[in-house]
Image (spheres, rainbow, N blue to C red):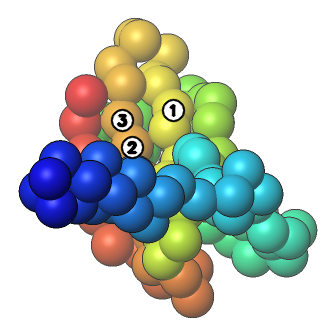
Amino acid sequence: MMSKLLLPALVITLLAGCSSPEGTSRRGAERAKVDPAQSLNMEQLCKGQAARRYNTGSQKIDVTRFEQFQGSYELQGATARKESFVCSFDAEGQFLHLSMR
């Protein structure tokens, strides 16, 4: 008799502990203010790195997306020949690496 009552109570307790209020969940990239000068510097550095990697001029490089994550930034772009790349930066805006996609 005791085990029949204990099992449902245990299941309810476990399920209640796993739930969280709707307001505390976060999805996707963190959204915070980015200094315009810093983002422009990151874009210019990314274009320069991509131009050197793809042996082209930085004016032929397009940065198409800027994303901020909890501890980093990513800039996605492409060359005039449609070669894709991603530049990664740390939280302070220092260049980490360029990935060819």
Kindly report the distance in space between the C-alpha atoms of the residues bearing marks 3 and 2. 4 Å
Q: Quadrant of residue 25?
A: bottom right
Residue 21 visible in this rendered orientation of the protein: yes
Q: Amino acid at mark 3?
A: Phe
Instruction: Please say if the residues under marks 2 and 1 sit with CB atoms less than 8 Å apart.
Output: yes
Residue at screen point 69% across, 58% down:
21
Q: Amino acid at mark 2?
A: Val
**Left or right, 41 with reference to 72:** right
Q: Earlier in the sequence, mark 2 or mark 1?
A: 1
Name the residue beneath numbered marker 2. 86
Q: Residues within 10 Å of mark 3 (few under 14, many from 20)?
A: some
Name the residue beneath numbered marker 3. 85
**Looking at this view, is 56 or 34 the one in front?**
34
Name the residue beneath numbered marker 1. 77
On screen, residue 14 above or below 94: above
On screen, residue 62 above or below 73: above
Q: Residue furthest top?
A: 81
Instruction: Please say if the residues under marks 3 and 2 sit with CB atoms less than 8 Å apart.
Output: yes
Kindly report the distance in space between the C-alpha atoms of the residues bearing marks 1 and 3. 6 Å
